Amino acid sequence: MTTRDTSQQPIELNEDCLALNTCTPEPDDDRRPVTVWFHGRRFCAGAGSEHLYDGANLASRGDVVVTVNHRLSVFGYLQFGAVDPAVGSNRVEYALYEIANPNFGEMTMDGLRRKLGTRLGDGFDEVVAAYSASRGTDDPWQLYIAIQGNDFQQGTNFVASMHSDAAPVFLYSFDYPVTRMMGACHGAKIASVYANATEATGSKPEAAIVEEAVCRAWIAFAHTGNPNHAGLPHWP
């Protein structure tokens, strides 16, 4: 097993950044599935060697885990010719982008109209009513986060639809509220994928159940191309 850096120190910026960070159960000749992870943040920030993507726990369950450090923004701009047939989004993606809002979690219906009235125009009442029915809430803040996060869900559905012409697609929504404040926000699933969720400060007792289900799904997908396993309802 590769050693782990648990210091969580800031990563030094360096042009010499083309690297693969590899975790493996054992350095032997056995054939194992490989999970390759390109980090998020729109190809303009971040690194595969950040603590968030520590693959040691996932590798200990049988996968080889490879995260990628690559050139970003104008220095890189990778272009992928294909997409992974397992795609998804989180329930309240947009919550992460409001984290600096001093009134986080607080909004009136008048405030919601001020925020989204220009964007939704004459369709404001219809859109808000539809989201209220689908989400089972009339809380203006929750509706604001859901509507603002719609682009994530629509983008996911578009990618899944386009790829389904060529191969089976396993579409998911990560709904587990990692924290009471942020819920299932953007990036919330990553710790469960890497089997690091239960190590997070303040993690809830049921995080272990979610971590096990998500991590095993990732491993099953790496092994067989299908994320189904005994710990999940059937994933059609």
Image (cartoon, rainbow, N blue to C red):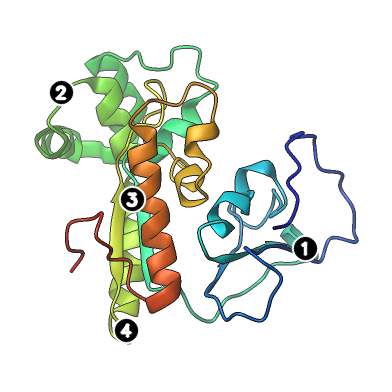
Q: In the rendering, at what x and y percent does residue 121 appear?
A: 25, 38
Q: Residue at x 27, y 66 (%)?
A: 228
Structural distance between the alpha carbons of marks 2 and 3: 31 Å
The amino acid type, in three-letter code, at marker 2 is: Asp
Where does label 3 land, which residue?
213
Q: In the rendering, at what x and y percent does residue 161 appear?
A: 28, 73
Q: In the rendering, at what x and y percent does residue 31 appear?
A: 57, 81
N-terminal label among 1 and 4: 1
Compared with 166, 75 (above or below) is above
Q: Nearer the viewer, mark 4 or mark 2?
A: 4
Structural distance between the alpha carbons of marks 1 and 4: 30 Å
Decide which of 58, 101 is in the foreground and name it. Answer: 58
Q: Which mark is residue 71?
A: 1
N-terminal label among 3 and 4: 4
Q: Nearer the viewer, mark 2 or mark 3?
A: 3
Where does label 4 land, which residue?
167
The amino acid type, in three-letter code, at marker 1 is: Arg
